[in-house]
Image (spheres, rainbow, N blue to C red):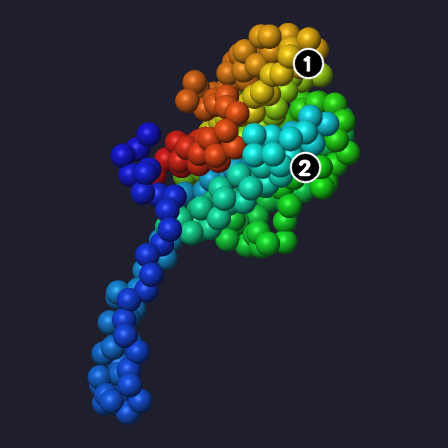
Amino acid sequence: MNQHMSDEIQKVPGAGGTPLAPGAASRFGQKFQQAAQKVTSPMEIPRVFHQLVIFLLDGSGSMTADGRSGRTKGEELHDAMSKVLERLQVSRNKNCFDISCRVYSTEEKQIIAQQSVTQLALDAWSFDPADHIEADETYAATSMEAAFEEARAYLQDKTDKQSNALIILFTDGDFHDEEEVAAVADQIRAHPGVSLATIFYETELTDEWVEVVGADYNENCAEVLRSMATEEADFASTVDPEAIRNHMIKSISRTSQV
């Protein structure tokens, strides 16, 4: 990672300057203070790069089960996504990020069309896939194909600019279309300027779960997701919702190229 990346996605410092008391300064003094405030206020960094981040969120039936916090996995995912996007919106480089989001299960759909992260009204959005799609089986290939097409179009539109695209795929289980998913992942990894990060939200296996899916279920699912990611650092496997948020931030930071 570029040595500056730890500073890139962070909150902008507050503006400096002290208001004038009514009638306390001459016209020259007022102009001087106004000029000083412009210097001491945080400067908005111009758009030095273009990064598209496409989130692909698992909306299958298992996402309606309780997660580690006692809330549903979908609700935990909403919290993680909200925190990631809040972080981007207060980044010094916030003007450089475009985002979009899709959810997938047996069907799939786009829930946020491509837009600047600064334009997104977070209070108006739910990132719990169950609020957007019927929770059923886990078919991700169609969403991945749509994301890959969007990423290629984004880069093609910005061939004269510093640009890249990151697809972040989140799931809590195995795929019903594993072969198709693997094929699309191969295409994404081979395309210059497009990266694929994968996050596996592990299942805390009870005795009942082990009887259904086997004791090595998490290891098997994690290996599939690891093989799909562009690099080892682009993969995470966890039962911790906070670690999900941290991995999304890390993946975005790694691909920002600033």
Q: Residue furthest front?
A: 207
Question: Which of the labelled discs sits on residue 129, or is there none?
Answer: 2
Q: Secondary structure at mark 2?
A: helix
Residue located at (29% from left, 85% from top): 21
**Sequence-first disc among 1 and 2:** 2
Is 243 placed above or below 22 here?
above
Nearer to the camera, 201 or 30? 201
Q: Position of residue 53 (x, y in %)?
A: 52, 37
Q: Is residue 203 visible?
A: yes
**Disc 1 crowd, CA 10 A, few/some/many (<14, 14-19, 20+):** few
On the rendered structure, is 131 left or right of 51?
A: right
Q: Position of residue 129 (x, y in %)?
A: 68, 37
Residue located at (67% from left, 17% from top): 175
Nearer to the camera, 31 or 202? 202
Q: Which of the 4 image quadrants contains residue 254?
A: top left
Question: Which residue lies under the disc numbered 1?
Answer: 208
